[in-house]
Image (tube, rainbow, N blue to C red):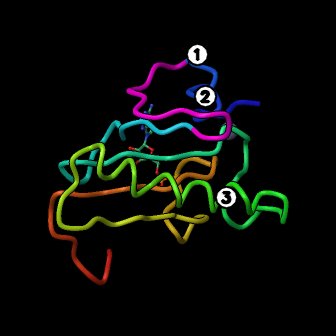
Amino acid sequence: MDCLFCSIVDKVIPSNIIYEDDLLLSFTDINPQAPIHFLIIPKKHIKSLDTMENDDLELISHIFKVIPKLAKQQGIEGGYRVVNNCGKNGGQTVDHLHFHVLGNREMLWPPG
Ligand code: AMP
Ligand code: ZN
């Protein structure tokens, strides 16, 4: 399967990895939208939040357990934003489930 983030998981495509365990990989975004911007993805290929199955729900709780730890470890202060772009109208450009974590600037609302 031709998937950019699966290639990053397989280390065929290099990335700046900040965290890895059996289930997850986290790496800095190549086009950062904040002073700190990293992605966290399941190693398993899941296309989007929309195609998740019940068995995958554990992954999501694990992701959200790891995010605050990484935010602290990466030096985010004063809060952060977690984003999942889902599908075309959600602005998803890579079809492998991922969560953005953005920090160290004040975020705007509503998002664009
Ligand atoms: P989304 O638009 O939510 O699908 O987010 C995809 C994100 O992946 C964007 O923020 C891109 O900058 C990021 N991205 C694309 N290619 C790479 C790469 N090779 N390494 C790290 N981040 C990437
Ligand atoms: Zn994939």
Q: Residue furthest bottom?
A: 110
User: From this viewpoint, which residue is outermost toward the top?
Assistant: 12
Looking at the picture, which amino acid does disc 2 mark?
Answer: Val
x, y percentage for residue 24?
60, 40
Amino acid at the residue labelled 3: Ser
Q: Earlier in the sequence, mark 1 or mark 3?
A: 1
Numbered disc in front, either 2 or 1 = 2
The residue labelled by disc 2 is 9
Q: Find residue 79 and report its image quarter.
A: bottom left
Instruction: Identify the element where label 3 is drawn.
Output: loop
Q: Are marks 3 and 2 in contact (CB under 8 Å)?
A: no
Determine the secondary structure under disc 2: helix
Residue 48 numbered mark, or none: 3
Ligand 1's quadrant:
top left
Q: Nearer the viewer, residue 71 or 12?
A: 71
Tell me the CA gap for discs 3 and 2. 16 Å
Of discs 3 and 2, which sits in the foreground? 2
The local secondary structure at tag 1 comes to loop
Q: Is residue 110 above or below residue 3?
A: below
**Residue 35 position within the rendered picture, expressed as x and y whole percent measured from the top left:** 18, 49
Q: Which residue is mark 1?
A: 12
Q: Which residues are magenta?
A: 13-24
User: Is there CB contact under 8 Å for labels 1 and 3?
Assistant: no
Task: Give the residue at x 52% y 69%.
Answer: 90
Q: Which residue is rendered at x = 53% and y = 58% of the image? A: 65
Q: CA distance from mark 1 to mark 3?
A: 22 Å
**Marks 2 and 1, how far apart in space?**
8 Å
Give the answer, above or below, for where 75 lies relative to 48.
above
Q: Establish if 45 lies above or below 10.
A: below
Kind of residue at disc 1: Val
For the C terminus, which image quadrant?
A: bottom left
